[in-house]
């Protein structure tokens, strides 16, 4: 756990930025800035008498350095609290020549960048370049923020890999590599949020016979980012075991992801059984490419962005 810095009032006459202005200046999503501050204590905010966060204007250049280092594979927790001279030293090692316009675009362009990320991810996958795939995932996570990254990069990446495999443009080796890289990344990204989570406990599970858990990993990460304590049961979980976990774990919600490989009729029947096996107080959230259109007593979400809008940040 990174030690929190003491909050202080902004100095008189200092030029301060709201979190929205800081986001626009650095092209880092507000959601990402808030998660970094909650997890790592940086960027450091002062408080106005009204209680609103404000940031010193030199925070802009600090975060621009951070974004450049993230593009070279560094992790936020390793660099966010470093002083400018140490960041510059690291950049000198990582960037022996000035940033080219192409490299700068990769790090700093926020809008419409998901397509470029997907293209680079697919090229790296075709080369079986694990390091490049992982680096692009890190850059996308830092640049787009959790919700956009999951909805616009992580999910579409696995869809594109599946399509390329079906068209024989990629082999099973490529699909396995891409799946392993994304799975490892999603688990590692969730871990620090899991450590800090203090909200309600939520079970994340898949139905019996469903074993493609990429969608569930993404939903679990989104839950953790919002402060929920995730009990990850994973693939092919018997209905009776989900119900038992609810009883044993003081759980208020169950999140179920259904993959496209799961037959709809079979999924509908299993979900109906699940709903009947749970207390009425327990909310069931449903998503995934194979999720039935509607099941009585279950809330269905078409996208992770829609699901994020339903979640209440928990501290």
Image: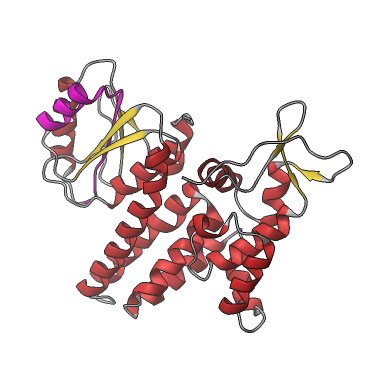
Q: Is residue 170 above or below residue 258?
A: below
* Residue 242 is a magenta residue: yes
Q: Is residue 171 visible?
A: yes
User: Residue 207 appears in which quarter of the rendering?
Assistant: top left
**Along the horizontal axis of the image, is 43 left or right of 199?**
right
What segment is highlighted magenta in the picture? 239-260
User: Residue 96 appears in which quarter of the rendering?
Assistant: bottom right
**Along the horizontal axis of the image, is 265 left or right of 285?**
left
Q: Is residue 124 above or below residue 180?
A: below
**Along the horizontal axis of the image, is 13 left or right of 156?**
right
Q: Is residue 168 above or below residue 311?
A: below
Q: Is residue 109 visible?
A: no
Measuring from the top left, give residue 302's x and y in whole percent.
Answer: 38, 40
Measuring from the top left, give residue 149's x and y in whole percent.
Answer: 47, 53
- Compare residues 112 and 280 and report the one nearer the observer: 280
Task: Name the outermost residue toward the top.
Answer: 280
């Amino acid at each position: 756990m990174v030690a929190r810095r003491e909050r202080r009032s902004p100095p008189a006459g200092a030029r301060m930025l709201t979190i929205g202005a800081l986001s626009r200046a650095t092209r880092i999503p507000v959601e990402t800035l808030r998660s970094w501050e909650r997890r790592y204590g940086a960027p450091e905010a002062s408080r106005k008498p009204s209680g609103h966060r404000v940031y010193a204007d030199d925070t802009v250049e600090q975060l621009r350095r951070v974004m450049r280092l993230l593009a070279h594979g560094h992790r936020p927790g390793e660099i966010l609290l470093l002083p400018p001279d140490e960041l510059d030293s690291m950049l000198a090692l990582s960037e022996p020549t000035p940033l080219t316009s192409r490299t700068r675009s990769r790090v700093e362009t926020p809008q419409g960048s998901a397509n470029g990320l997907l293209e680079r991810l697919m090229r790296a996958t075709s080369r079986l370049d694990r390091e490049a795939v992982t680096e692009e995932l890190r850059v996308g996570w830092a640049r787009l923020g959790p919700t956009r990254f999951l909805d616009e990069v992580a999910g579409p990446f696995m869809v594109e890999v599946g399509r390329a495999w079906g068209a024989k443009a990629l082999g099973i080796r490529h699909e396995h590599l891409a799946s392993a890289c994304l799975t490892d990344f999603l688990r590692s990204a969730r871990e620090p949020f899991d450590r800090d989570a203090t909200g309600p406990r939520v079970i994340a599970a898949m139905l019996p016979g469903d074993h493609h858990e990429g969608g569930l990993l993404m939903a679990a990460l989104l839950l953790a980012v919002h402060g929920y304590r995730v009990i990850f049961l994973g693939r092919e979980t018997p209905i009776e075991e989900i119900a038992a976990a609810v009883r044993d774990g003081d759980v208020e919600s169950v999140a179920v992801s259904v993959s496209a490989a799961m037959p709809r009729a079979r999924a509908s029947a299993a979900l109906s059984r699940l709903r009947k096996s749970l207390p009425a107080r327990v909310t069931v959230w449903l998503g995934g490419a194979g999720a039935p259109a509607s099941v009585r007593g279950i809330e269905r979400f078409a996208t992770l962005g829609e699901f994020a809008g339903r979640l209440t940040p928990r501290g």
